[in-house]
Amino acid sequence: MAQKPIVMEQLKQVLQLKNDGVSIREIARRVGISRNSVRKYLSKLIDNTFLPNKELADKAYNNEVLLHQTSRLHKLIQYFKDTGDELKRTGVTRQLLWNEYLLKYPDGYGYSQYCYHLSEWFKQADLAMHMEYVPGDLMMIDFAGKKQSYVDKDTGEIIACEVFISVLPFSGLIFCYAVPSQKTIDFADAINCMLSFYGGCAQTILCDNFKTAVIKTDRYEPVFTELCHQLSEHYDTTFSATRPYSPRDKAMVEKSVNIVYNHIYGPLRNQTFDSLTSLNKAIEIQLRLLNDKPYKHTPHSRLYFFEQDETATLKALPSEPFGFKKVTTLTVQRNYHVQLTEDRHYYSVPYKYVGKKVQVYYDKKVVEIYNGYERIAFHPRSIYNKMYHTLTEHMPPNHQHMKQIKGWNKDDLLSQARALGAGVERVATLILESHFLVEQNYKSCFGLLMLSRKYDAVRLEAACNRALQGTRVNYTMIKNILAKGLDKSNVMGEVKPIPHHENIRGKENYQ
């Protein structure tokens, strides 16, 4: 193995001691190199004591060897650039890549030197950038990899639970909260508690690519879940996701997870909790201590920087916390209603959307129906009242007409008839009392009143007075009198009385 060259400082000491008249043995002792090395360098540097470092190195060292080493290292670095990502592939090892390297460069480095230079290259290729954060601009959220647990006091079962962690990168203020799972309802609960803890919301919430938040991962355009869209709208914020397999995108919350392990998990390790509530109360106590603890080399804590610089920059929260709405896509039926299968209730939409697919958002209180981005219907939700929830404005004109008929009662109809005339009122009374099917009576009476629109009130009154001279009266009779213009004639044909004979029976025969 070739002898390792001495450093430039040692080389200059050798030359200086030689000029001072020091012997080779003493030079070797003082500098810490062998006498042969002293003789070798002095033989190359006779009368070259005051040369610049570059020229001194050219004469002192075997530059042909150095150039060879430089060229060999350059080829190795280029090989790393070409094959560095290969290590991520299944079955690829450093040994395999080194064997392939020697096939390409037979005079290359041995395995130990190859691994050493590969590690150094990874250090240079994986540099971290210092990020400057703006107050109120960003919140980072994540779930801890290690779970917490509590004991069911009824069964004695140990129940594991997820731990939600968030941080404001500017001040470093940390939030920690245990939830049963990472499911939609628990994630929404964690977000509500987090924003209540901070007292406001940042411009952007940065999360990892867990399934509750992200449907499809993508470096540039990830697809978020409906829950995130609803949260964004409710809290006037924006969700953003890290690049896949890039934990440094949220390095602050990754570091906060480790801080939580040390300052919350550690102190609570020997405590037993009988519910999720008692666990979160204990976490809250430790969290307060953590956020009040001063940073190293400063008297100020996370809470101090938050209150001084960040709390005023957060967006104000709505009056009520977020409530998740379930979403389903339904087709509007021919009766211009959609059915929620959960409770089998029907909710109306404007009739023009019949046959179209609409998005229905609902919770325990309300049902909202959207066509694209336009809300077309809103109903209070109730599973106890009638099955059909219909708004009049959603009905086509003829159906509104029918509803108007059904919505009137006897007094309403007679009141309107009275306004048209005494004859009209009398006919309306007879019609309403003439049949056992009340709904049919109302329809006939309503039809009578509508004749005043086609004709006028004077003619309708005249037609009713003419019809009242007969033995019976109904809507069709009045309609025919008006259509034939008989209401304009004041003289009716003489009505001959029926002669009295023994075959005539009176009303007492039909009791």
Image (spheres, rainbow, N blue to C red):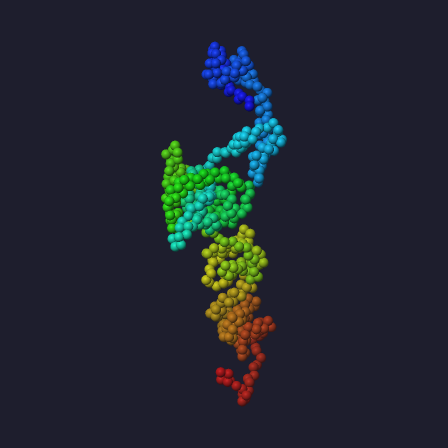
Regarding residue 423, the answer to whether it shows in the image is: no
Pick the front one: 86 or 453: 86
> Is residue 476 at all visible to an observer of this figure?
yes
Give the vertical position of 90 relative to 407 (above or below): above
User: Count the marks: how many?
Assistant: 0
User: Which residue is at the front of the view, 454 or 273?
Assistant: 273
Image spot of residue 230 (x, y percent) = 49, 49
Viewer-nearest residue: 10 or 107: 107
Decide: is 221 above or below 360.
above
Q: Position of residue 505 (x, y in %)?
A: 52, 86
Residue placed farthest to the top in the image? 21
Residue 223 drawn above or below residue 382: above
Q: Residue at x 43, y 49 (%)?
A: 160
Q: Residue at x 44, y 48 (%)?
A: 161
**Rendered residue at 50%/72% (across/down):** 438
Q: Give the left or right position of residue 284, taking residue 185 as reference.
A: left
The location of residue 183, given as percent across then percent down, is 48, 50
Q: Residue furthest right?
A: 104
Looking at the image, the residue that sits furthest to the bottom is 502
* Residue 408 x, y percent position in the rendering: 49, 67
Figure check: 467 above or below 313: below
Quarter of the N terminus within the rendering:
top right
